Amino acid sequence: MEKFEFSVIASGVDHEADDFEDRFFEAGCDDATIGFSRGSVILHFAREAASLNDAIQSAIENVRAAGAHVDRIEPDHLVSLSEIAARSGLTRAAATNYAKGERGKGFPHPVARVTSESPLWDWVQVAEWLADRGKLRAREVEAARVVRDHNLALEAPAPRADAARRFA
């Protein structure tokens, strides 16, 4: 077993209730530090599991068992140039130069806020590009994929019962 650190951002529970922390502890979140910020419950886990995927999946189940809605997992898969620099150990200037194509070709294009002053990149794409150049380990790329896949699954709309009947 290995220890994995990540945060679950949740909502739908009253953080001022007397039993707020007890609910999470009793639901299996005894390995999480619980806080509240910007309208969300933040549970920072240091969870032992066979894999990061198993750690995140069990944390999601525990948070839901406490009656909360899981909004997303952090560190998020959408990143700014500053976040790219921080996660990869590069300087902000180096990350900027990569993004501009001045320090290597083929750096991924932004995937969100493309027309704004602060675009966002898919961390998985960036991590793969950096790993191909020896700047990140394959393990970090896999962790990025796991977090992104969980967040995409959390963002997906729930299947509608009537839609399933139409195709039966």
Image (cartoon, rainbow, N blue to C red):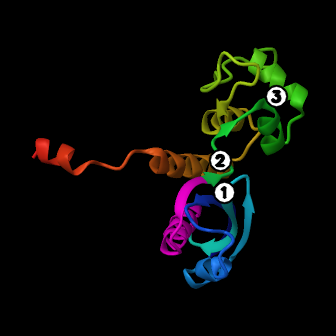
Cα–Cα span, label 1 and label 3 = 30 Å
**Three-letter code, disc 1:** Ser
Question: In which quadrant of the rendered view does residue 79 lie?
Answer: top right
Q: Nearer the viewer, mark 1 or mark 3?
A: 1
For residue 54, side relative to residue 118 (left or right):
left
Instruction: Give the main secondary structure, helix, strand or loop, of the magenta stretch.
Output: helix
**Three-letter code, disc 2:** Ala
| Above or below 86: residue 46 | below
Q: Which mark is residue 40?
A: 1
Question: In which quadrant of the rendered view does residue 106 lie?
Answer: top right
Q: Name which of mark 2 and mark 3 comes first in the sequence.
A: 3
Q: Residue at x 26, y 48 (%)?
A: 160
Confirm or deny contact between disc 1 and disc 3 (CB under 8 A).
Answer: no
- 8 or 68, which is in the foreground? 68
- 34 or 110, which is in the foreground? 34
Q: Nearer the viewer, mark 2 or mark 1?
A: 1
**Label 1: how many Cα within 10 Å (few below 14, some 14–19, many 20+):** some
Provide the residue span drawn in magenta: 51-72
Question: In which quadrant of the rendered view does residue 31 lie?
Answer: bottom right
Residue 130 spot, x, y in % from top left: 71, 34
Task: Report whether residue 167 is seen.
Answer: no
Whether the magenta-drawn stretch holds residue 66 is answered as yes
Q: Which residue has dot 2 on it? A: 138
How many numbered discs sit on the rendered protein?
3
Kindly state the secondary structure of the residue where label 3 is placed: helix
Cα–Cα span, label 2 and label 3 = 19 Å
For residue 90, side relative to residue 14 (left or right):
right
